Image: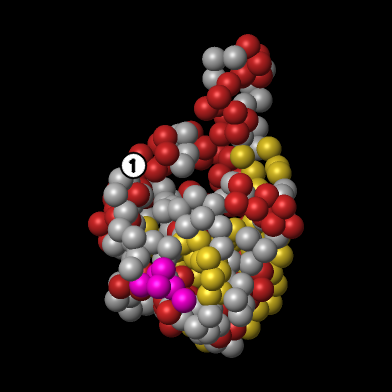
Amino acid sequence: MRISKATNRNTIANQLCIVCGKLDSKKFYNGLTKCNNCGFVWADINLSSEDLMKIYGRDYFFGDEYIDYLAEETILKFGFRKFLNQLRKLFPANTDVPKLLEIGSAYGYFLDIAKEDFYVTGIEISSDAVEYSRNKGHEIFQGDLSKLNLQDKYDIVVSFATLEHIVSPDKIIRQAFHLLKPNGYCYITTIDIGSFFARFRGNKWRMIHPPTHVSYFSSATLKLLMEHNGFEVIECKPIWQYRSLNALFLPKLENSLFYKFVNFLGVTKIPIPFYFGDIIGLLAKKA
């Protein structure tokens, strides 16, 4: 796939940082630029709407980023329930059913379980994922949130592993603030380039792969972005992840005796918790 290089992102010493607003940056790892003031890191590429539609087509979920996204449904929902258990505590049981908006809802797995406690709506760019979610009965808006003219107001906006995929995440955060009711909540997970593990791995960190990952926050820069856009940060900390042996080993070991043995035992789809400290979850409130 041909991705357009940004002519203004590598005269980038001439680009304002979207987090702190300073005009002071330098080359970081290959293809990345870092703000000297706050430490926010971004990829030196400019993605058009056409580029995004190509990147996040069906192949992204079936062979490119994931082996088989639908086959991971049970595992992904297991992890999503951990988040949901925390989020439902924000709303007393005797109140009206709160309204939830998910940015980057993919195939609707979080919406599937969140509808037990919320009126749910999703935003997704992938046509295949949108169609799949709508066929399950979910209300899904297709496109870039910063360009959509949504009229409703929500009690909570969530985004799981999406902010790193967005060229201008500041626009998304401002739109999320606008769409929230007074005292509404925002919960975000994203990768943490400031974590010990990311710094230890350097340019070999597994999360560095433009054009799918283009915005690289640390805990400090994510909190700063939220605060600069009107949010009060309640919590920001590393979180656990859950994957299956299928997702971890299938590409290389599918034909091995080891894989065939553990698959025979029925353990390849069991949720495997892992923790590198390089994924963060942030909870904020509309101040």
Q: Which residue is mark 1?
A: 58
Placement of the N terminus among the 4 image quadrants: top left
Residue extending furthest left? 50
Residue 161 location, x and y as percent? 53, 56
> Is residue 206 shown above or below 252?
below
Residue 49 location, x and y as percent? 28, 61
Can residue 243 be seen in the rendering of this structure? yes
User: Which amino acid is tagged 1?
Assistant: Arg
Residue extending furthest top? 257
Circle 1: element type: helix
> Is residue 2 shown above or below 267?
below
Residue closer to the observer: 88 or 75:
75
Q: Residue at x 47, y 57 (%)?
A: 31
Residues rendered magenta in the picture: 8-13
> Is residue 142 shown above or below 275?
below
> Is residue 127 shown above or below 9?
above
Q: Residue at x 33, y 78 (%)?
A: 151
Q: Name the magenta segment's main secondary structure.
A: loop
Q: Residue at x 41, y 53 (%)?
A: 211
Looking at the image, residue 260 sits to the left or right of residue 73; the answer is right
Residue 242 location, x and y as percent? 64, 44
Dot 1 crowding, Cα within 10 Å, few <14, some 14–19, many 20+: some
